[in-house]
Image (tube, rainbow, N blue to C red):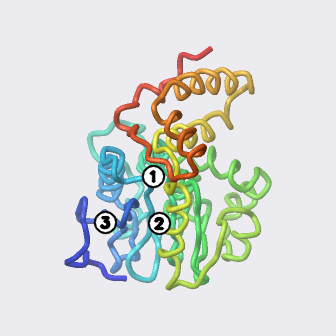
Amino acid sequence: MSSVPDAAADVLLERSTLWVERRGSAAIVWLNRPDRLNAFTYAMRDDMVAAFDVTDADDSVRAVVITGTGRAFCAGADLESGGDTFIPEDGLGDVPPDSGGTTSLRIFDSRKPVIAAVNGPSAGVGVTMTLPADVRIASEDAKFAFVFTRRGLVPEACSTWFLPRVVGIATALRWTMSGATVRVADALAAGLVSEVVPKAEVLARALEIAGEFTDGTAPVSVALTRAMMWQMSAADTPRLAHRVESRLLVERGRSGDVREGVASFLEKRSPVFADVVTDHAGDFDWDGVT
């Protein structure tokens, strides 16, 4: 995997730690510090936020794939600063936001489905920032190191919220308290990844999955469904889900997309949905629904 975009690539964003390439209706976020195994830095945090700002703002992008250049996905935090690595940046106060958490929350807030194509080993934040992805697939040589307690740290990147929802509380506790390195077969068995494929096929398979989310589906409905599933699964009561679903069913039911969806079904043709996510930001505001 090249560490520079191909000259023919449709590059949406190019930064010091990554680039974003359009591939059909999908965007690929390439983590790009292969000489450091794509280790995570403050700059990568900022670049990841910028990448998802770009993909959210581009209605031609229907799904996002995250992968790495070189032989690793992400080796975790860059430890080049030694013991000072985890001292906060100057000027951010005594308790600044966790950089991994800032990244995870931006991925969580994506208006497009997210697939993590884990093309090799990942550790620390290299694992935890993939947890807000909707699908994770891995290469046969991947492994996942939850090394925090072995570095004197605690889990980060909102993983204490995400990981138990992905693999269950018992597995999450075992992996994180022990600082385990999880083999890809065990990651598959626990549900951390949904598929394991040969290394050369990881990106292609991720793009196929992106197509499952985008072919013949309404972009606004996909975005709303993603947000509803993540947030309502953590609601205190199913009654909140009922109220949110009821409101959105009415709003979507009045849309041109629904008329097109029904007409295309009756006419036995592929639908052409006109609504775009950037015109429907208000549909995602259900904090006031009671």
The answer to whether 240 is drawn above or below residue 72 in the figure is above
- Look at the numbered disc 3 and give the secondary structure of its residue: strand
Looking at the rendered structure, the kind of residue marked 2 is: Gly
Which is more N-terminal, label 3 or label 1?
3
Q: x, y (%) of residue 187? A: 69, 69
Q: Which mark is residue 100?
A: 1
Residue at 53% from the left image edge and 45% from the top image edge: 264
- Which residue is denoted by mark 2 in the rendering? 76
Residue closest to the eye, 276 or 258: 258
Decide: few, some or many residues near mark 2? Use Cα within 10 Å; few <14, some 14-19, many ≥20: many
Q: What residue type is labelled 3?
A: Glu
The residue beneath circle 3 is 21
x then y, percent, for residue 20: 31, 63
Instruction: For the N terminus, give its image quadrant.
Output: bottom left
Q: Where is residue 54 in the image (x, y as percent from the top left)?
A: 29, 50
**Separation of residues labelled 1 and 2 (CA atoms):** 10 Å
Name the mark nearer the viewer: 3 or 2. Answer: 3
Observer-nearest of 191 and 114: 114
